[in-house]
Image (cartoon, helix red, strand yellow):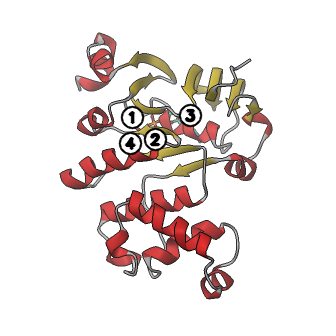
């Protein structure tokens, strides 16, 4: 059984697709308030691990606990989102023809349909929350601009803001800096570090400069299990990691 101070606890998790073990006896523990970077070669199982955490894929064996004692294998995707796990996929999916502010408002409202949400008068609470999120995602100046006019990096930040609007305890962020400029990449590391002060975060990323700037514990996956885990310096000095990933 997991400790109550863990945000995520995976133990002995395996899943096979047509006999191929994409996740193979995987164990990983994320503490409350921790940010973790997940690295590893293509096909290592990073996406499948996120799919298991969010309930998209059900493991064949193993334990998956969230926020101490919530058994995620007993919940479906919708439940898991409600329980407080937010996921950001690689490609931004903001509402292009709405303003930055309205995108956040829609996310705050969650499942309500778009029209009542936009015509409804905003409460002071909502205004305050939107203001806070805009500051975190570095888009205060772009509040009234249409999302379609943001740069690729800013769209990624807006989507991270939309996740924050749903107030998750754990954020799963998949390759956030792919396609970003160097300046946006550096700012994204600062932004995620700010978010990690009040949330647990898992970031999957191939960009090692970015991972270094995150300055957090790193887990390298390979063939569906943990190959190496520790500081980036420790993991990068691990010959097995160099052989299967970094040296390529
Ligand atoms: N639904 C599925 N059906 C069959 N095979 C799958 C399925 N999902 C994943 N796989 C296989 O499982 C393995 C792990 O894939 P996964 O996408 O989790 O790797 P990854 O580490 O996210 O890779 P990348 O860095 O390329 O995103 C791969 O060999 C993949 O082809």
Cβ atoms under marks 4 and 2 closer than 8 Å: yes
Q: Quadrant of residue 155?
A: bottom left
Mark closer to the chain start, 3 or 2: 3
Q: Which mark is residue 233?
A: none
| SS of the residue under disc 4 | helix
The residue tagged 4 is 193
**Residue lying at 68% horizontally and 34% vertically, measured from the top left:** 67
From this viewpoint, which residue is outermost toward the top? 239
Pick whichever, 8 or 137, lies toward us: 137
The residue tagged 3 is 49
**Residue lying at 23% horizontally and 26% vertically, measured from the top left:** 248
Q: In whole angstroms, how far apart are the C-alphas of marks 4 and 2?
A: 5 Å
The residue tagged 1 is 42
- Does 34 appear above or below 26? below
- Residue 83 as seen in the image, left or right of residue 45: right
Q: In whole angstroms, how far apart are the C-alphas of marks 4 and 3?
A: 22 Å
Mark closer to the chain start, 1 or 2: 1
Whether residue 26 is visible, yes or no, is yes
Q: Is mark 1 within 8 Å of ligand 1?
A: yes
Residue 96: percent from the left, percent from the top?
44, 77
């Amino acid at each position: 059984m997991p400790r109550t101070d863990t945000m995520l606890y995976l133990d002995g998790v395996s899943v096979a697709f047509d006999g191929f073990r994409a996740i193979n006896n995987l164990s990983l523990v994320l503490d409350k308030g921790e940010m973790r970077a997940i690295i590893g070669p293509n096909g290592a199982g990073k996406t499948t691990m996120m799919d298991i955490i969010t309930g998209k894929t059900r493991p064949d064996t193993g334990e998956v606990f969230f926020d101490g004692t919530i058994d995620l294998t007993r919940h479906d995707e919708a439940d898991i989102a409600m329980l407080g796990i937010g996921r950001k996929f690689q490609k931004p999916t903001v509402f292009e023809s709405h303003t930055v502010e309205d995108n956040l408002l829609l996310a705050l409202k969650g499942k309500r349909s778009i029209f009542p949400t936009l015509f409804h008068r905003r409460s002071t609470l909502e205004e305050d929350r939107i203001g806070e999120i805009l500051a975190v995602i570095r888009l205060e100046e772009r509040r009234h601009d249409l999302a379609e006019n943001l740069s690729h990096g800013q769209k990624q930040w807006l989507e991270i803001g939309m996740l924050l609007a749903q107030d998750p305890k754990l954020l799963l962020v998949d390759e956030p800096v792919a396609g970003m400029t160097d300046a946006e990449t550096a700012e994204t590391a600062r932004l995620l570090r700010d978010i990690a002060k009040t949330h647990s975060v898992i970031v999957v990323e191939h960009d090692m400069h970015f991972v270094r700037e995150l300055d957090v514990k790193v887990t390298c996956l390979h063939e569906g299990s943990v190959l190496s885990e520790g500081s980036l310096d420790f993991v990068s000095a691990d010959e097995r990691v160099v052989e299967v990933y970094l040296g390529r």
